[in-house]
Image: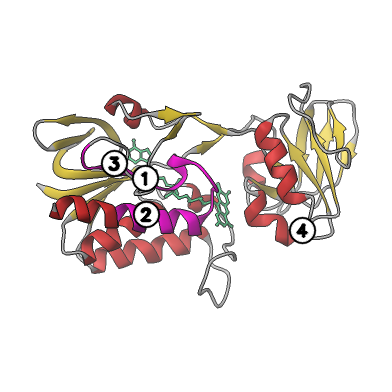
Amino acid sequence: MQDVVIIGSGPAGLSAALYILRGGFSTTVIGKDNGALEKAEKIENYFGLDHPLSGHELIENGRKQVQDLGGTLLQDEVVGISWNGNYLVSTASTQIEARAIILTTGTSRKTLKIKNLAKLEGHGVSYCAVCDAFLYRGESVAVLGNGEYALHEVQELLPVVGSVTLLTNGLEPSVDFPPKVTIIQTPVLELVGTDALEAVCLEDGTQLHPACLFMALGTAKGSDLARKLGIRLEDERIIVNEQMDTGLPGVFAAGDCIGGILQVSVAVGEGAKAALSCIKYLRS
Ligand SMILES: Cc1cc2nc3c(=O)[nH]c(=O)nc-3n(C[C@H](O)[C@H](O)[C@H](O)COP(=O)(O)OP(=O)(O)OC[C@H]3O[C@@H](n4cnc5c(N)ncnc54)[C@H](O)[C@@H]3O)c2cc1C
């Protein structure tokens, strides 16, 4: 029996664990993997770093902090949660009973099967304008997408970069983009580059050379676990109140799974806030 099971071992989950443990409660953090940050080549937009850290290093530091405080980390996928007076969290290999749950399951960014895209993530392909715009100030960048999420990324980029080309990949823009943005509807054929993005090749043979390609297709699939628990979702995001409370007794949520600004500092802050609310619940 644990006081709290935290589902998700990204920055929000690990941050929540630190507060739960320091509050004198036991916790097991269950995560399938290290989350979105594992893909981030360099984290610079985070307080207190005297040099950029890779996402992997930042997560490993966080995992060590949790273990040093006596927290348990379990690499596994949670497949179900049931209620028998406490919460019963099931993975493929085990079941853990807990008085409270913190959901920090992140989100997955929609992507496309484009040749070399996966290889160039973090090397000229970005999924976060607010994180990376600064690295391309004054330069020409491209955004791949055609809807609200692409518009959001374009609006983040325009005040910082030199110019933005929107690649809609064969689709009509579904919202109005600022007139400053060049819109190209021709489908993307492949990306070229070995260690860094060198060109975006379109199906009509055109080659573009943006300093960065920002993927802005939106986020995919909300938390299936939240859905199973009957927690309210909106646009596939878990709805919480100011206290990170989902409305289900003892179930809190934080980080990318609740949406908002998808940044490590935000996830860490929300993880801490969810943990403090959870501690209040456990003490009540
Ligand atoms: C390529 C890339 C680069 C980025 N660069 C930056 C950057 O430079 N600066 C910045 O501030 N932010 C950056 N971000 C964003 C940042 O990584 C995220 O905002 C942050 O990781 C969100 O933390 P989280 O804990 O909410 O979710 P995540 O880090 O995504 O963690 C989710 C966790 O939930 C687990 N999980 C999900 N479902 C289950 C389940 N059923 N059972 C068990 N575990 C489950 C996952 O395995 C994972 O451990 C970047 C993101 C990407 C993809």
Residue range of the region highlighted in magenta in the rendering: 249-275
- Label 4, residues with CA under 10 Å away: few <14, some 14-19, many ≥20: some
Report the residue marked by disc 2.
271
Residue 76 got which mark?
3
Q: Is mark 4 within 8 Å of ligand 1?
A: no
Name the spot of residue 281 as percent of width and height, x first.
19, 50
How far is disc 4 from disc 2 in space, using C-alphas?
30 Å
Image marks 4 and 3: residues in contact by CB distance under 8 Å? no
Q: Nearer the viewer, mark 2 or mark 3?
A: 2
Name the spot of residue 4 as percent of width and height, x first.
20, 49
Q: Could you tell which of marks 2 and 1 lies nearer the N-terminus?
A: 1
Image marks 4 and 2: residues in contact by CB distance under 8 Å? no
Name the spot of residue 31 as percent of width and height, x first.
33, 45
Report the residue marked by disc 4.
136
Tag 1: residue type? Thr
Q: Is residue 61 above or below residue 234?
A: below
Q: How is the model colour-coded?
A: secondary structure
Tag 4: residue type? Tyr
Name the spot of residue 243 as percent of width and height, x first.
34, 49
